[in-house]
Amino acid sequence: MNLSSNSKVKIEGGMASMTDLVFLLLIFFIIMSLMSNNQTPIDLPQTDQDINPVTDPVTATVIVTEDNRYVVMPGGSLDDPMEFDQIKEITASAVEKSGKMKLKISGHRKASYEAVFQVLALSQANAWDPVLAYDK
């Protein structure tokens, strides 16, 4: 009793359909490359344009120290930095006294990102515009 089959299944793939697919992809990419516009105009500032200095400086400032503590200016002292919970009310009164809804944030280069982001979150929660100060 012979149970084996004499018919063999071909496992080979047809190459004709593969060449058709490659040809269609080639046509698609040629058409798309011709349709793309590489000449998009960009309005860049000219090199001879001067940057106008800030005529309306922000007076309410929070300084983040190297050890991730905070000093609120004006009125604060770098010799006596505070924790974040202590500066919330002081910062609100400093922004209110300045008459502007802006808060300048200045951080030491070794201060952690989390310390600066806490002040940014405080600014966002009170709808103040944050102004980040940096040295060149």
Image: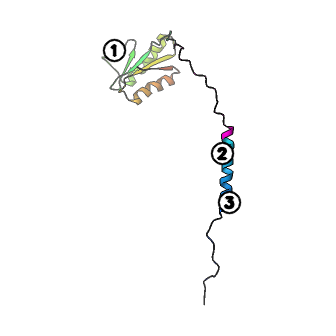
Q: Spatial distance from mark 3 to mark 1, Cα to Cα?
A: 77 Å
Instruction: Classify mark 3: helix, strand or loop.
Output: helix
Residue furthest top in the image: 55
Q: Number of marks in the image? A: 3
Residue 26 in the figure: left or right of residue 48 = right
Residue 43: percent from the left, percent from the top? 61, 22
The colour scheme applied to this rendered structure is rainbow
Q: Quadrant of the N terminus?
A: bottom right
Instruction: Classify mark 2: helix, strand or loop.
Output: helix
Q: To which residue does mark 2 refer? A: 29
Q: Of the residues shown, which amino acid type is indicated by label 1?
A: Ser
Residue at 69 percent across and 51 percent down: it is 24
The numbered dot on residue 77 is 1
Picture quadrant where residue 86 is located: top left
Instruction: Classify mark 1: helix, strand or loop.
Output: loop
Q: Please say if the residues under marks 3 and 2 sit with CB atoms less than 8 Å apart.
A: no
Residue at 41 percent across and 30 percent down: it is 114
Residue 94: percent from the left, percent from the top? 44, 14
Residue segment shown in magenta: 33-50
Residue furthest bottom in the image: 1
Q: Spatial distance from mark 3 to mark 2, Cα to Cα?
A: 19 Å
Q: To which residue does mark 3 refer? A: 17
Q: Earlier in the sequence, mark 1 or mark 2?
A: 2
Residue 31: percent from the left, percent from the top? 69, 43
Q: Of the residues shown, which amino acid type is indicated by label 2?
A: Phe
Of badges 1 and 2, nearer the viewer stands 2
In magenta segment, residue 102:
no
